[in-house]
Image: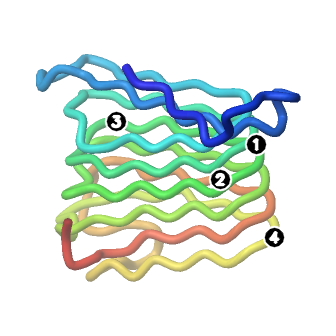
């Protein structure tokens, strides 16, 4: 575990920029849970069956292979980049965009997308009327104020 501080003197906590890096052994975890009140969260290439990531104020960025995702932030963007979507994804942001990226286009997928103020854009091959094929994992994205997107990208 490493703690990085960009200022040598700490006058007030709100002016201190801290970065906490936690190393996790290379093993398959059942669940990875990361929670913060204020601050951005980055989850790198960690193998877990389920990811639970919550930030009251701050963005969430995930670069993972696959797994169940539950991500929530009141204020901030959520971006999840996966190799493939094989499990359910649920992402909620009161104020902020939510983008799900996958290197491999899913053969089957269901979506439930809700944006009170913002656009919804899904650019996956064969996506039509909220799904691809029959069944598949559910991708549920909810944002009161923000854009929603699910897209294929060229890979890691």
Find residue 33 and report its horizontal and vertical position in percent: 45, 22
Q: Relative to 147, say whether 55 is above or below.
A: above
Which mark is first along the chain, 1 or 2? 1
Q: Are marks 1 and 3 in contact (CB under 8 Å)?
A: no
Find residue 61 and report its horizontal and vertical position in percent: 47, 51
Q: What residue sits 76% from the left and 49% below the top? A: 75
Which mark is first along the chain, 4 or 2? 4
Tag 3 residue: 68
In depth, the one of 154 and 43 nearer the eye is 43
Q: Distance between the residues labelled 2 and 4?
A: 11 Å
Find residue 16 and report its horizontal and vertical position in percent: 74, 36
Q: Quadrant of residue 80?
A: bottom left
Q: In which quarter of the image is residue 37?
A: top right
**Residue 5 horizontal side relative to residue 30, left or right:** right
Which mark is first along the chain, 2 or 3? 3
Q: Which of marks 2 and 1 is in front?
A: 1
**Residue 124 horizontal side relative to residue 9, left or right:** left
Tag 1 residue: 74
* Residue furthest right as drawn: 12
Pointer 1 local density, CA inside 10 Å: few below 14, some 14–19, many at least 20: some
| Image quadrant containing the N terminus | top left
Which mark is first along the chain, 4 or 3? 3
Tag 4 residue: 117
Which mark is first along the chain, 4 or 1? 1
Q: Distance between the residues labelled 3 and 4?
A: 26 Å
Q: Distance between the residues labelled 3 and 2?
A: 16 Å
- Residue 142: which disc? 2
């Amino acid at each position: 575990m490493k703690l990085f501080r960009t200022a040598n003197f700490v006058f007030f906590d709100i002016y201190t920029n801290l970065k906490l890096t936690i190393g996790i052994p290379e093993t398959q975890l059942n669940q990875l849970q990361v929670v913060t009140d204020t601050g951005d969260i980055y989850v790198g290439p960690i193998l877990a069956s389920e990811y639970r990531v919550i930030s009251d104020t701050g963005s969430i960025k995930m670069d993972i292979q696959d797994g169940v995702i539950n991500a929530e932030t009141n204020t901030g963007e959520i971006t999840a980049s996966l190799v493939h979507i094989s499990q359910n994804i649920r992402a909620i942001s009161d104020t902020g965009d939510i983008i799900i990226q996958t290197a491999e286009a899913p053969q089957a997928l269901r979506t439930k997308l809700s944006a009170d103020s913002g656009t919804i854009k899904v650019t996956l091959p064969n996506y039509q009327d909220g799904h691809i094929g029959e069944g598949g994992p559910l991708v549920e994205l909810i944002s009161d104020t923000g854009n929603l997107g699910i897209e294929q990208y060229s890979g890691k």
